[in-house]
Image (cartoon, grey):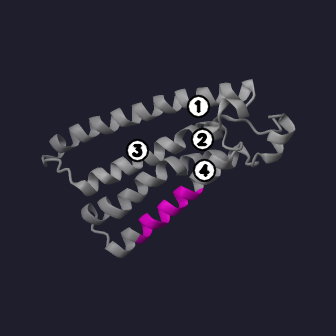
Amino acid sequence: MDSTRAAASDIELPRRIRRPLAVVAMVGYPAAVFCWTIGQTWLGLPPAIGGLAGLALILVTLFAMWRIYEFRSHLAQAPDAQLDERQVQIRDRAYLDSYRIFVGVTLVALVVAGLVPGILGRPLTLTFDLVNWFVMGAVLISLALPSAVVAWREPDLAD
C-alpha cells in the first residue's frame, strides 16, 4: 500500500481529539455498568435515571471506539500485506502494549474483587448478570484496546 493511498484513506483526527476519545472508549463501558447496575443498587438511583445514563454512556463509548478504530484505516487490525514496515512495527507494538495493559488491569480487578468483600465485611455474590457485564466488558475493551493504543501514540501527520 503506497503512502499516498494510505494518507488519502486515513481519517484525520488531531492527537488532542484522539486521546480523549481513547480514554472515553476505555472508561465509558465501566462507567455505564456502574450507572446501570451498581449506581441503582448501592446509590439508590431510580432505574430510569441509571438506565438512561448507562445507555447514553454505552452509546458514547461505542462512538469513541468507532472513531479510534477508523483512525489510520484500521491500522491495528490490518494484515501485514496491507501495511509497510513502519506500520507493521506500530501495529505489533500496539498489540504487545495492549496485552500488557489488559493483563495489568485484569489482575488489579481480580485483586480488588478479592479484597473488597473482606474490607466491606460482605461476601461477593456472583450472578450471571454480574459475570455477563464483566465478560462483555472484557471482550469489548480487548477488541478496541489495540486501536486505542495506536490512536494515543501516533503523532499528527503535520508532526
Disc 2: which residue: 147
Disc 1 marks a residue whose amino acid type is: Ala
Q: What distance separates the C-alpha of mark 1 from that of mark 2? A: 8 Å
- Amino acid type at mark 4: Leu
**Is 43 within the magenta?**
no
Of labels 4 and 2, earlier in sequence is: 4
Mark 1–mark 3 CB contact (< 8 Å): no
Whichever of callouts 4 and 3 sits on the residue coming sooner in the sequence is 4
Query: Does label 1 or label 4 sit earlier along the sequence?
Result: 4
Is residue 56 in the magenta section?
yes
Element on which disc 2 rests: helix
Name the quadrant of the C terminus. top right
Disc 4 and disc 2 in contact, CB within 8 angstroms: no
Q: Position of residue 39 (x, y in %)?
A: 32, 62
Asked if the residues shown at circle 4 and circle 3 are in contact, with their CB atoms under 8 angstroms apart, the answer is no
Q: Which residue has dot 3 on it? A: 138
Q: How many marks?
A: 4
| Label disc, if present, on residue 23 of the rendered structure | none
Instruction: Identify the image quadrant of the N terminus.
Output: top right
Q: Earlier in the sequence, mark 2 or mark 3?
A: 3
Measure how far apart labels 2 and 3 are at the Cα level. Answer: 15 Å
The span picked out in magenta is 52-63
- Point out the tag, 1 or 2, that comes first from the N-terminus: 1
Q: Give the residue drawn at x 33%, y 39%.
A: 109
Front-most of residues 37 and 119: 37
Percent x, y of residue 55: 45, 66
Determine contact: label 1, label 2, CB under 8 Å: yes
Give the label, 4 or 2, closer to the camera: 2
Q: Secondary structure at mark 4?
A: helix
Residue denoted by label 1: 94
